Structures are given as C-alpha cells and as structure tokens.
Image: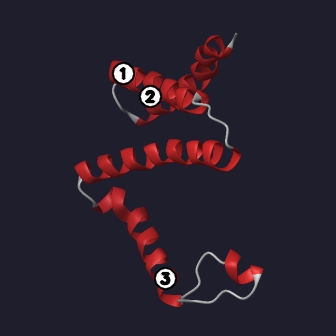
Amino acid sequence: MDLIESYNEELRLVRKFWTGFWIVLLLIALIFLPWYGKEHWVYILTLIFIFSIGVQGQNLLIGYTGQISFGQAGFLALGAFTFGHLVRLGGACCNFSTLCRSCSRTFRPAGGFPLSSP
C-alpha cells in the first residue's frame, strides 16, 4: 500500500513506472487495432467506446453534481439514431459518413428541443 503524503502525489495519474508502461502499451495497441485487428473486434470495441462516452457523461452529471437528468443520453441516442439511419440508406463510404455525422449534429438539437420544452 502506498502512503500519499501530499496533495500533488494524490493528483498524479500514474504513480508507478510499470503502470505507466502498461498504459502506454495499451494505447499503442488501441491505435494500431483498426489496421491489424479483426473487423468484428474493431466493431465491438468501437461500440464499447461509444457507450463509454455516454456513461462518462452520466457519471459526471449524476455522480459529481447530483442532478438526475437523462437529457444528455437522449441527445446521444438521437444523434446515433440519425447517423445509423443515414448510413443504412446510403452505405458506409467515407464521404457519406462525414455527411451523416454533420447531419446528425444538425438534427440532434432540432430533435431534442421539442423534448426539452415544457
């Protein structure tokens, strides 16, 4: 067990050399995964990372502030829903995916405004 004696020691993200080594190794593996990994694993890990963004948003909102609000999750779901339908209609080529992302960013607030109005 490590005894923390100062506030600066507590704020350090990596306290040991080997922990930092394994974190850097994991990040390098994640960077090269789309090129060298199997398509199924890339798909699964992409879904995990997308869901973790929504979970971290809820953790910040509910855990640290104590506000119980699922509006953030609604906006994330609305953007994902729009993106999924646009990709399904036109395929998943790179230029069309960029268009779908920009459309989902446009329609997310437009769809969320009526949901948030009293």
Instruction: Name the residue beneath numbered marker 1.
Output: 90
Going from the N terminus, do you reach mark 2 or mark 3 first? 3
Disc 1 from disc 2: Cα separation: 7 Å
Residue 104 placement (x, y as % from top left): 54, 25
Point out which mark residue 96 bears. Answer: 2
Q: Amino acid at mark 3?
A: Thr
Local crowd size for mark 1, using a 10 Å CA cut-off: few (<14), some (14–19), many (≥20) = few
* Image-based side of 19 in relation to 57, left or right: left
Q: Amino acid at mark 2?
A: Phe
Asked whether the residues under the numbered discs 1 and 3 touch, taking CB atoms below 8 Å apart as contact, a structural biologist would say no
The residue located at (23%, 49%) in the rendering is: 40
Q: Which residue is mark 3?
A: 19
Secondary structure beneath label 1: helix
Secondary element at image label 2: helix
Place of residue 21 in the rendered image (x, y in percent of width and height, measured from the top left): 48, 83
Residue 19: where, in percent of width, then height?
Answer: 49, 82
* CB-based contact (under 8 Å), mark 1 and mark 2: yes
